[in-house]
Amino acid sequence: MTDNDRATIDPTKSVIIERIFDAPITSVWAMWTEAEHFAAWYGPMGARIPVAEMDVTVGGTRRICMEMDTPNGAMQMWFVGEYREVAPHGRLVYTESMSDADGNVMSPAELGMPEGTPTTTEIIVELSNVDGSTSPSTRMVMTHVGVPAASPGAQGWSMALDKLADRLVAA
């Protein structure tokens, strides 16, 4: 994370997770940037990703559908965003907003979210090689700016990254 990022990120309003994966940096990068890989691990346990459209270029857009089973049947949540930085195998920055199925951004109030919830959040993924490892290992720091550290979103990210780790092992 750059010094500028550290200066502007409020850790109480951001999820920051660091993980070490026993996998080469190219494999971890692919998990974040290739739709079929992303769809296989994204979301909390039990979530499915039936739609993952990702144009991983600066200014490119993304459209993701997360589906969960509830007692009332399947529930879908849609997310859209834009890629702001794409530095292959090093840094990925994109925005995320909740939307309807057509990609129209919805306000937090429309979705029944608490007052003060931002309409758009930002995800920063930083990857680096782990020096001194006997096999290729990758350090990942994922920061989701605008999602409180003590929120259900933080728990969802933790579960999702467990799924990412399992997928890397299986690859």
Image (cartoon, rainbow, N blue to C red):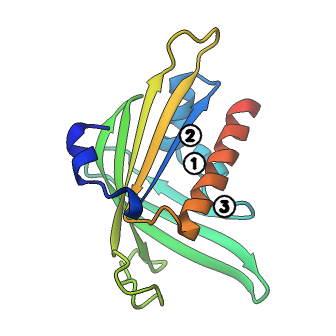
Name the residue at 69% across, 64% down: 47
Using the image as rendered, state which of residue 33 and residue 149 is in the foreground. 149
**Comparing labels 3 and 2, the label whose residue is closer to the camera:** 3
Regarding mark 2 in the picture, which secondary structure is present there? helix
Whole-percent x, y for residue 34 in the image:
52, 42
As drawn, the label of residue 31 is: 2
Q: Which residue is tagged 1?
A: 38
Regarding mark 1 in the picture, which secondary structure is present there? helix
Amino acid, disc 1: Phe
Q: Residues within 10 Å of mark 1 (few under 14, many from 20)?
A: some
Q: Residues within 10 Å of mark 2 (few under 14, many from 20)?
A: many
Up/down of 42 relative to 28, above or below: below
Gap in Å between the C-alphas at discs 1 and 2?
5 Å
The N terminus - image quarter: top left
Where on the picture, by quarter, is residue 20?
A: top right
Left or right: 77 with respect to 100? Answer: right
Amino acid, disc 3: Pro
The mark that comes first in sequence, 3 or 1, is 1
Where on the picture, by quarter, is residue 22?
A: top right
Q: Residues within 10 Å of mark 3 (few under 14, many from 20)?
A: many
Amino acid, disc 2: Met
